[in-house]
């Protein structure tokens, strides 16, 4: 379970063939889905874009 290091956790909604991986009560926090020969892992932390990715792009 990957939850450490996240600033804010957003709730996901899934539809088949996606599957909830980590739930808190009825809220889905992490999900997975098969895509081609691989597996997609989904988690939503809205601060990743603002705090990490955008900052990384500005420092290039």
Image (cartoon, grey):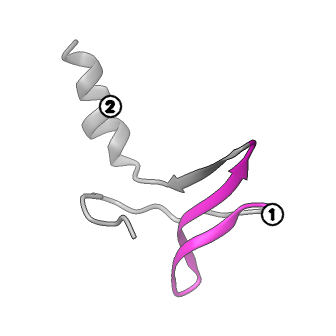
Q: Nearer the viewer, residue 10 or 38?
A: 38
Q: Nearer the viewer, residue 24 or 17?
A: 17
Mark 2, residue position: 53
Mark 2 or 1: the one toward you: 1
Q: Measured from the top left, where is residue 32 in percent x and y?
A: 62, 60
The residue tagged with tag 1: helix, strand or loop?
Answer: loop
- Is 37 left, or right, of 50 in this rendering? right
At horizontal 47% and vertical 61% (from top left) the residue drawn is: 10
The residue tagged with tag 2: helix, strand or loop?
Answer: helix
Q: Nearer the viewer, residue 34 or 59?
A: 34
Mark 1, residue position: 16
Above or below 2: residue 44: above
Above or below 33: residue 51: above
At horizontal 79% and vertical 61% (from top left) the residue drawn is: 17
Q: Which residues are magenta?
A: 17-36
Q: Quadrant of the N terminus?
A: bottom left
In the rendered image, the residue lying farthest to the left is: 59
Q: Measured from the top left, where is residue 53 in percent x and y?
A: 32, 31
Quadrant of the image occupied by residue 20: bottom right
């Amino acid at each position: 379970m990957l939850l450490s290091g996240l600033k804010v956790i957003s709730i996901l909604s899934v539809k088949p063939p996606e599957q909830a991986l980590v739930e808190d009560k009825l809220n889905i926090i992490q999900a997975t889905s098969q895509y081609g020969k691989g597996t997609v892992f989904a988690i939503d932390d809205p601060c990743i874009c603002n705090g990490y990715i955008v900052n990384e792009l500005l420092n290039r």
